[in-house]
Amino acid sequence: MGKSFCLVAVALAVLIALLLPPLAFSQGCALCYTQAAASGARMIRALRSGIVILIIPPLLMCTGAIALAYRKRNQFNDAGKLVKPGTDW
């Protein structure tokens, strides 16, 4: 079961990788670019600050998750903390 699951996961990852590039290229459409360029310096500054503000929460969440995983990495491997069978209630 483990080998077939791994094969399905790899196939799914390849399929997703093949389907995502058209979606990524659609983000640079000419209409969006011309509207942003024609909006003026004040709107461009607001757009740039909005991008920075929107990137901060995901960056902090990812950093926190990585720090938490790093701190808890040996929690289940420590021999002194092993729970005896029948005493985990």
Image: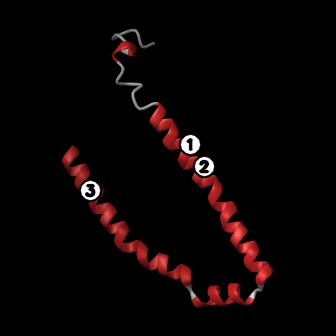
Closest to the camera, between mark 3 and mark 2, is 2
Q: Which mark is residue 55?
A: none
**Circle number at residue 64:** 1
Callout 3: 10 Å neighbours few (<14), some, many (20+)?
Answer: few
Judging depth in this view, the residue of 51 and 19 nearest the camera is 51
Density class for disc 2 (Cα within 10 Å; few <14, some 14-19, many ≥20) is few
The reply to whether discs 3 and 2 touch (Cβ–Cβ < 8 Å) is: no
Quadrant for the N terminus, please: top left
Residue 31 image-quadrant placement: bottom right
Question: Mark 1 packing: few (<14 Cα in 10 Å), some, or many (20+)?
Answer: few
- The amino acid type, in three-letter code, at marker 1 is Gly
The amino acid marked with disc number 2 is Leu
Task: State how the image is colored.
Answer: secondary structure
Residue at x 36% of width, y 9% of height:
86
Q: Which residue is mark 2?
A: 60
Counting residues from the start of the chain, the first of labels 3 and 1 encountered is: 3
Q: Are marks 2 and 1 in contact (CB under 8 Å)?
A: yes
Task: Classify residue 47 by image quadrant.
Answer: bottom right
